Image (cartoon, rainbow, N blue to C red):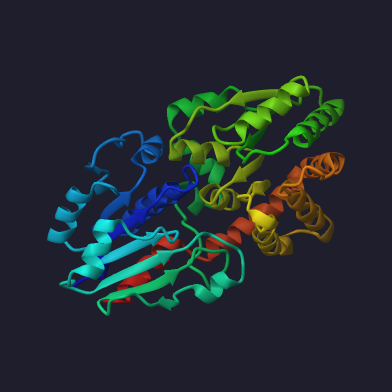
Amino acid sequence: MSFSLDITFLCKVVDNYGDIGFVYRLARALNACRPEIRLRIVTDNMESFSQLAPEVNAYASVQQYNGWTLYDWNADDVCTASFSADQPKIILECFQCGYPDWLETLLFKTKCRDSVQIINIDYLTAEPYADDFHCLASLTRSAAVKKVNFMPGFTEHTGGLVLDGPFASDRPAVYAAAHAGNSVQHLLAGFPHDFKVLVFSYERDFTPVVKALSLFERSRQKDSPAFRLRVFAAEGRGKKSFMEAWNTEKKPFAVTELTFLSQPEWDYVLCSMSFSFVRGEDSLSRACLAGIPFVWHAYPQADEYQQIKVQALVERIKPFFENEDAGLIEKFWYLYNVTSPQVSGQEQTELLYTLLDRTERLGICFSSFAQMLRRNGDFAQHLISYLDGLI
């Protein structure tokens, strides 16, 4: 029996598109590494999947796409029949999503014909525990069902990040431009010389950000009158609050509102920016690998717990920067991720303006950080090598 030839993904969509986005990216990367791998994807939100991959039918209980078989998590009868006749060998449980009722029955309430290996793929974190948990075994309720943790991460002691398409290249923007779709290429081609800023964030008060961007544009225009800044406001939870702040501040710079983009189009846009504000897991990993200056908005949690995750990533990034620049990044990232409305807007504006003004030199450091991440290796290839070792 070859474990490496039969992989089933389990994915529940919790936060918009980041969960299924990671699954979609990893599935493509696995097939790129080993085309003969058979992939089945079980998700509870096929509609979100169809937004990232428009050829996917949002309403089908089972369908073929890209050589894979896609299943609706809640299609109990269809899934029970299919997976009973063809028992899964490797299950990738993504982000501790648990098991559908029908799979719970197949794994633990009926006798498995063969052993099953469950790989728990956890959320991306820069926290030290990722190193400790990587490849750590867990118990299940059946001797026939084995389980192990497999951690994406930022060190060589984790599985690393998925290195696909432009993100496997030392020149992501050049690669992305050569492989992007015509529509998004045409969009960005209309602004070849603009200082491009991507805004993809959770809800927050964007007034300090808008003021800093406006101040930066006016400052640069004193020396270069033709200088233009343009924000690309992405679809998502933070778009409304950004546009409200921009309107309140009397539209001080140009904004282009993006429609929802497929994953390859999104990758191209992200790689084409001068500066980015990103959120979530998949977009965070892409921003890290793109090698351009960015600010991360972590998912807001009770008691400001998100700051632990933010600080952990800052600690990974800081060694690539001069002390002063590292301190500026650390302080602004902290303020950007505070949920309290009492945080000084003026301080945020001043810090962000300084970061924007240093974009060129910061870009060299972010690029060095991206190169280190690529040296850590490809998550998909690390996963395949691990599975090969189980044979």
Looking at the rendering, which quadrant does residue 241 occupy?
top right
- For the N terminus, which image quadrant? bottom left
- For the C terminus, which image quadrant? bottom left
Query: Percent from the top left, x then y, of residue 155?
Result: 57, 68
Q: Inspect this view and state whether residue 132 appears.
A: yes
Taking the spot 45% from the left edge, 35% from the top edge, the residue there is 180
In this rendering, position of residue 13 left or right of residue 367: left
Question: Can you say whether 120 is above or below 167 in the image?
Answer: below
Query: Percent from the top left, x then y, of residue 249?
Result: 78, 24
Give the farthest residue toward the bottom: 143
Give the farthest residue toward the top: 250
Task: Please name whichever residue, 236 or 184, is drawn nearer the observer in this view of the structure.
Answer: 236
Q: Inspect this view and state whether residue 37 appears.
A: no
Taking the spot 62% from the left edge, 27% from the top edge, the residue there is 192
Question: Can you say whether 113 is above or below 152 in the image?
Answer: below
In this rendering, position of residue 57 left or right of residue 86: right
Q: How many marks?
A: 0
Query: Percent from the top left, x then y, of residue 356?
Result: 77, 41
In this rendering, position of residue 368 left or right of residue 208: left
Question: Can you say whether 264 is above or below 259 in the image?
Answer: below
Query: Percent from the top left, x then y, of residue 179?
Result: 44, 38
